[in-house]
Image (cartoon, grey):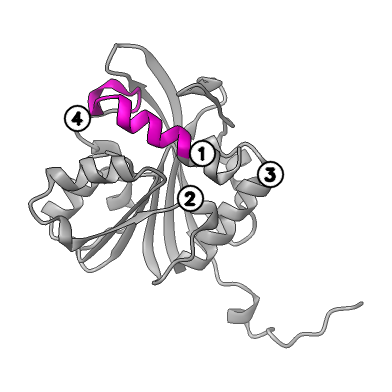
Amino acid sequence: MIAIDRQTHWEGVYTTKAETDVSWYEDAPELSLALLREAGLRPEMSVIDIGGGTSRLVDALEASGQAHVTVLDLSAAALETAKARLANADRVQWVVSDVTAWTPDRPYDLWHDRAAFHFLTAVEDQQAYVRVMVQALKDGGKAVIGTFAPDGPEKCSGLPVARYDAESLQAVLGERFKLAATRRHQHTTPWGSVQKFQFSTFEKVAGPERLGIRDLKLPG
């Protein structure tokens, strides 16, 4: 699905459904907060929530005094809903963009993605996502990525998804990211069905330029 189609789809979702009428809704982002804290979250750190939509993670981070929070989503309507909940929405950077086409304007300490990456089923979109994550994260920064597990749903919001365990996700992310932790999770939707997820945390490792071989001449 090309970027404009994705944007049209998600704008449609968030303009026709209430915040509590989507399968991924949760009252409090307890797992996301726990995983970010395990990844080293501190108040002075910069955090970006990819595909944040109307998630309440931004509420929790802003309320805790997080120094810099960015929320990126394809849907302007979703971000407007999230903004309307916050008394200090101007403290948050709101970005309406497809992550695969986004250019970061600052480095981040932590990258959070709860169920956005698994909608990228084309290899070129997955590769574009990884390139952006490499650009956005500081060396040593952590990425917390949640996707449907191998025994999770095959579709969500009418769209096909790619399902992962930690090892298959590591294979897609490549050598710039090292698996630091993983766990299974069962999410209960607002209507009581159970969806099986995996959440994995990766650390960004230094690239060749940081290893002192920027000028190395390769054969051919």
Is mark 2 in CB contact (under 8 Å) with mark 4?
A: no
From mark 1 to mark 3, how far is it between C-alphas?
16 Å
The circle drawn on residue 154 is none
Ranked by sequence position, the earlier of labels 2 and 4 is: 4
Nearer mark to the viewer, of 1 and 4: 1
Where residue 163 appears, as percent x and y from the top left, is 57, 30
Nearer mark to the viewer, of 2 and 4: 2
Q: Does residue 15 show up magenta in the picture? A: yes
Residue on which the image places disc 1: 6
Where residue 126 appears, as percent x and y from the top left, is 61, 47
Quarter in which the N terminus is drawn:
top right
Magenta residues?
8-24
Residue on which the image places disc 2: 98
Asked whether, in this view, residue 157 is left or right of residue 170, the answer is left
Is mark 3 in CB contact (under 8 Å) with mark 4?
A: no
Amino acid type, label 4: Asp
From mark 2 to mark 1, how far is it between C-alphas?
8 Å
